[in-house]
Amino acid sequence: MVMEIVCPAGTPAALRAAVKAGAHTVYCGFNDETNARNFPGLNFDRAEMRAGVDFAHAHGSKVLVAINTFPRAGDEAIWHRAVSAAEASGADAVILADLGLLDYAARNHPGLRRHLSVQAAAANADVINFYADTFGVKRVVLPRVLSVPEIAAINCETKVETEVFVFGGLCVMAEGRCSLSSYATGLSPNMNGVCSPASHVEYNEQQGVLDARLGGYLIHRVEKGQPAPYPTLCKGCFSAGDKTGHLFEDPVSLNAEKLIPQLQKAGVTALKIEGRQRSKSYVAQVVRNFRTAVDALEAGQPMPEGMLARLSEGQAMTTGAYKKTWR
Amino acid sequence: MELTVGPNQFFWPADTWSGFYNDLAGSPVDRVVIGELVCSKRLPFYQERIPEAISKLVEAGIDVALTSLALVTLKRERKLTSELAEMGIAIEINDLTALAHLPEGTGFSVGPLVNVYNEGTLRWLASRGARRVCLPPELPIKSVESLVKAAADLGVAIEVWGHGRLPLAISGRCYHARLHGRTKDNCQFACEDDPDGLDVRTEDGRPFMAMNGVQTLSDSYACTDHQIELLRSVGVSALRLSPQSQGFMQLCSMYRQRLDRNLNRGELSKDVLSTNPGIRLSDGFLLGACGADWSGA
């Protein structure tokens, strides 16, 4: 079976662009703190979600709704309403991370398909099967800590579908288990749906040197005219011992296009593209390229090469944990 | 309020490890969580010493629980995790994988690396046998308060991160190995050189984080000296003190005195700062604008 391309949509326009470009599936979220890309001007209100699902279904595509932050104590009703709204919109599944919310959805919305978000960081077959047996989870988005052989081994031991990230931003830490951002800024992916938020970024140029700070901490210092990457915490330049450099990760993004055949052999069901904050033209381009690749693979034809390099905007690319030496 | 000592997050030589738990048996703490949390490669160096350490602690009247690993990916790690349930000792799960292996109905406790952010999750864990939960350190006091209320009805004790470098992230990648130009599989145990983690500074020299193998910690030592009255009034059952290589027994005694009202607010942190020049304290996750904030500044 052809591998499913799961594509991000931060806006109704991006959803339509992705569907037209050939996305089998689009994932998106409501415009509040219930999803892990809670950025200003992004995401869907209830009516837009309904219209988006109708549009996708009319074109033979599916829609997944990410409700993948961890509900705040005392305010769980906001997240419960989001699950209801996703079901009412006709969405094909919800993507959840929180144990309490999974339990709620399984009990109150048994007919709504449940996917396990990468934010749950389920990294082995035992725990994936546990989520399936306990909450009826049908698909797991694997955390970006696993190599391709490890993914293959997981697929031998579970009936749960696996979805893996192949392109876009790269978390270096196990997802859903990182509070670096709230340590520096007070806002975190788990609680607020944001990491290294733009509201806490400051740029300061002095004597030809550009400093990028997050929450007051210097993340990058580059000479004027040099590329200045966004100050994402875990990809900053720091010192430890007698060394200075990108101690956690270089300012790279993930590109696993060359690994698609291996991922298919490893039993992966779906390939996920990161980037709900991206423009509709970017999304359409990435979708077209990945769709071409999986269709070629399915037809037994050679994969088109290097098709995505120019979309990385000059950023370096990595295959991340899929190659064991990344560790 | 009680004192729980969390699992040692660092890699210490086996003799240092044994000496630490030997000393702890004579300390005024109520509960110790023991075992390997961060990296399964460290465990063989001290694994055979765990039973003796447990015996000594139990003889001293201290409750003991075994921790699970925080991130379980390899076959050998899955095996280790499945065997925890057979040890005949209480288990603290720090990854849901450990719960998958516990027979239903077995009581257990939940460590700070399991995401318990709301009442629904707490209720579900309690229904599976959770008796004690140490909350994730990033939770603000308002969430702690709501969760304590819910926990009271469920018969679950709530613990909060009381003192020590904060566990901020866990990764598949070993940063100590990367710093030395190695991979995790060929790490040569670089993390052993840093018994409290290796300081990570910004390029302009500001302390920010600490690396500890696959784990990333805060540069600052979390300290609840200024929040003890608040935490008590909210109904928190216990504070968690996280092992450090220097002055830990003294720290346990001071927290005991502070809880027993024999030390005033501010005295404990003042002592910690004067005996450990160069370190920074924080308590911002509970009340501040960000985790790194310190109310005693």
Image (tube, rainbow, N blue to C red):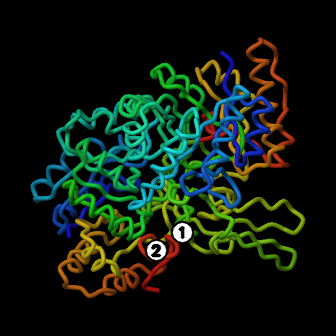
Q: CA distance from mark 1 to mark 2?
A: 8 Å
Q: Nearer the viewer, residue B42 or A188?
A: A188
Circle 2 SS class: helix
Q: Are marks 1 and 2 in contact (CB under 8 Å)?
A: yes
Quadrant housing the N terminus of chain A: top right
User: Which type of secondary structure does the marked residue at label 1 adopt?
Assistant: loop
Q: Residue furthest right?
A: A225
Q: Which chain's residue wears label 1?
A: A
Q: Position of residue A258 (x, y in %)?
A: 75, 28
Q: Which residue is mark 2?
A: B284
Residue type indicated by callout 1: Gly
The chain under label 2 reads: B
Residue A93 drawn at (x, y percent): 55, 34
Residue at image coords 81%, 31%: A288
Q: Tell which of A106 and B58 is nearer to you.
A: A106
What residue occupies the far top of the structure in this picture? A300
Quadrant of the rendered structure where residue A208 is? bottom right
Q: Which mark is residue B111?
A: none
What amino acid is at disc 2? Gly
